[in-house]
Image: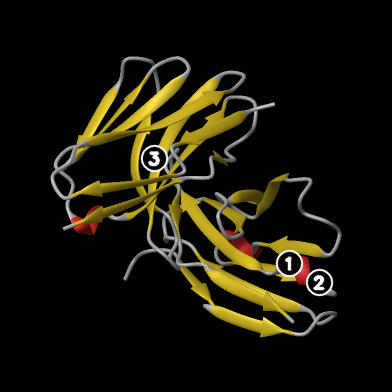
Amino acid sequence: DTGVSQDPRHKITKRGQNVTFRCDPISEHNRLYWYRQTLGQGPEFLTYFQNEAQLEKSRLLSDRFSAERPKGSFSTLEIQRTEQGDSAMYLCASSLEHEQFFGPGTRLTVL
Amino acid sequence: EDQVTQSPEALRLQEGESSSLNCSYTVSGLRGLFWYRQDPGKGPEFLFTLYSAGEEKEKERLKATLTKKESFLHITAPKPEDSATYLCAVQAQNSGYALNFGKGTSLLVTP
């Protein structure tokens, strides 16, 4: 399968714990994006990378969130001191041109 | 501020009953308008990109059109397997490559 992959697919954590998600983009894509989606809403942009450089961050990305893309390949999204409001689907996408291709998402539940 | 509004929120069709979904947008310089399909618990699946007013794209039973203020996704003779949420997103010329999504239209096609 040559699509975008994300790991884990589901994560249940307790409030206050840290979590980290991984995204592997389509291999030739140089741009990688993170979005968050809650029930009944469209995805909301969080941040994006061109190669290893993080070029844009949404105001939704509080200081508890950090993303990295070392060497311009896979990316990680870490949430520190999770809150119940962080419960959502976290989606990763990648692109070479304008069209963004999404992975299956990581469903986070914060108890 | 860029805005994307999709209507209706939900639509129920009989198999074979054609209809259209609407996406109204305001954006300061459109780079592209995107349509995605999303099945429950999965990531969005790319359908179409439209770049300029008057442009049309087709794929099987779906046809997307674009004007300066809105886009339509026409579904001709739908089948039950077309049931999904259809998401519209805009990419503005001055917002990097972030996609701004609407809330989606939930389509149910009954046999």
Q: Nearer the viewer, residue A108 or B18?
A: B18
- Residue B35 bears which disc, if any? 3
Residue B2 placement: quadrant: top right
Residue A97, given in percent of the width and then of the height, sits at 43, 40
Q: What element carries label 3?
A: strand
* Residue behind mark 1: A86
Quarter placement of the C terminus of chain B:
bottom left
Neighbour tally class for label 1: few under 14, some 14-19, many 20 plus, Cα within 10 Å: some
Indicate how the structure is coloured in the image.
secondary structure
Q: Is residue A88 above or below residue B108?
A: below
Kind of residue at disc 1:
Asp
Residue A65 image point, x, y percent: 78, 63
> How far across and how far down the image is residue A9, in percent?
52, 78
Label 2, secondary structure: give it. loop
How many residues crowd around disc 3 within 10 Å: few (fewer than 14), some, or many (20 or more)?
many
Q: Name the residue under label 2.
A: A83
Residue positioned 32% across, 15% down in the render: B54
**In terms of depth relative to the viewer, which is nearer, A63 or A48?**
A63
